Amino acid sequence: MTKVKGGLHFLPLGGSGEIGMNLNLYEYEGKWLMVDCGVTFGNKLGIDVIMPDTEFIEKYRGKILGLVLTHGHEDHIGAVPYLWKRLLCPMYATPFTAVLVRGKLREAGLLDAAALVEVPIGGDVQLGPFDVEFITLTHSIPEPNALAIKTPVGTVIHTGDWKLDPQPLIGEAADEKRLRELGDEGVLALVCDSTNVFVEGRTASESEVRQNIIDLVKKQKNRVAIGLFASNVARLETCLLAAKASKRHVALLGRSLHRMYRAARESGYLLNTPDLVEAEHAMSLPRNKCLFLCTGSQGESRAALTRIANKKHQSVLLKAKDTVIFSSRQIPGNETAIGALQNALQSQGIEVIGSRDEFIHVSGHPARDELRDMYELIRPQILVPVHGEQIHMREQAELGKQLGIPKAIVPFNGSLIHLSPDNPKIIKEVHNGRLGYDGNRVVPFDCQHISDRSYLSQEGIVFLTMVINDAGEVDQPSLSFVGLAANKEEEGLLTHGVLTEIAYFIENEPPSSWQNDAIVQEFCSIAVRRTVRKVCGRKPMIVVHIIR
């Protein structure tokens, strides 16, 4: 177990050096506070859900006082149902986030076991040496919170995801008054979102896109589908109001949209919007009387928009002169998938409208002027940029120093930082990594079967079965090449080459060799390796079965 020296420490295990998968820890005198527990999504080696490796903090499981959740985005709460059993600590969240987390716990069969404490907006909780106050900010989901973490050493402001939107449409504007009061009291460190640090000026308000979306939908003559982030409840409300203004009926397509809609209604949002209809009913209406709100704006292979584009959706079919509106941004890394999705739609004569064509999306993260505002409100002694790649975090550290913050520390996942007022520094690196939800289990990305899967995806595999009787006579070997032969001709070359090599060994090895499985496996592997390298230039995994 890693011994932590005295004082206050900050340790990110996810979300530093990357955008997503946030998991942050604070330590004081052997007690730990966890902030957020999120996932990232991808399709790496067949694994869609990826989360931080919690091996380090599991050693301190009895000393984790609580998991505090800043807001309800998947990269902040998505790992809770997968990792809670490893942590066994109480959780704290404001009402909307709590509704979402309860749904996840219910699906995982953990609702009765896990302690989830609902904290009122603007409330606080005392967890040992950590006095945690929830401070309202704005973001692209209801009830985003900064945390004022008060300790005997000083106060840390952990922003979570945020921007300063004067008209957020849903929820209250940021509590700048309370932030300034905390700054007046004195703030040791600001742990701050870095996502939009390269964007000059201010992030536009959610209210600025509402009328544009309403007007755009009203212009359309046929069926309309809008791709959006399910968690952006204000945008969801805007789309519902656009349907009302254009006299269209709305159907939601995608589980996450239905889940978010229910959570919003349960939390008192979206109460004055038109009722929904089923997708089948919407398809029976005149083409100018329906509006579909869809998941899949990032080109996800199983999401509603992709299935519509591939004509595989069970209920919805779009045709030429229908319109698909992408009220979202391209998340880095998704450009190819989004391009393929939009091309598939356009090839069918469907009009595609994105945020480059119309002002129909705004970010939920702070641009440079908002970062300046936060620094002026908080006036921290130390700036710790998080929630970004290294290029984002280093740029924010430089910006903070230019604007008068005395010290800045750029973390990486696994960096244990001593938040000393005089000499903050990284004192050691602890174990960190990634876990994946593979099938129905959570596994480390560096485990053997994931390594094997990675190797197979690049180099292929060869199965060879040798049948040897008691007299040492060898039947015709059985061969199977997976992920190697480009065509039947190449498969024939591979088979012929391997059998020729094995025949050479049979002719030249003494009969005693055939009684030793290790020798047989070795020369069979050599035969395969030589042949595949000559024919394909690859180094496959080789599995030799010997049957006697």
Image (cartoon, rainbow, N blue to C red):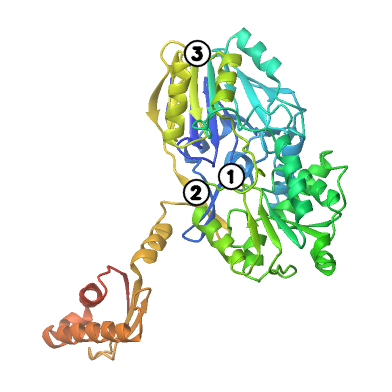
Would residue 314 be seen by someone viewing this image from the given angle? Answer: yes
**Would you say residue 466 is visible in this rendering?**
no
Q: Position of residue 256 (x, y in %)?
A: 70, 52
The crowding category of the residue bearing disc 2, from other C-alpha atoms within 10 Å (few below 14, some 14 to 19, many at least 20), is many
Q: Earlier in the sequence, mark 2 or mark 3?
A: 3
**Residue underneath mark 2:** 435
Residue nearer the viewer, 395 or 462: 395
In the shown orientation, is residue 468 left or right of residue 56? left
461 up-or-down from 63: above or below: below
| Numbered circle sitting on residue 381 | 3
Amino acid type of the residue tagged 2 in the rendering: Leu
Identity of the residue drawn at 46% across and 60% down: 45
| For the residues bearing labels 1 and 2, Cβ distance under 8 angstroms | yes
Where 252 sits versus 160, above or below? below
Q: CA distance from mark 1 to mark 2?
A: 10 Å
Instruction: Name the residue type under label 3.
Output: Gln
Cα distance, mark 2 to mark 3?
35 Å
Q: Nearer the viewer, mark 1 or mark 2?
A: 2
Q: Which residue is mark 1?
A: 83
Q: Position of residue 244 (x, y in %)?
A: 85, 50
| Residue drawn at x 24%, y 77% as measured from the top left | 535
Number of other residues with Cα within 10 Å of mark 3, as a class: few under 14, some 14 to 19, many 20 or more: many
Q: Which mark is residue 289?
A: none
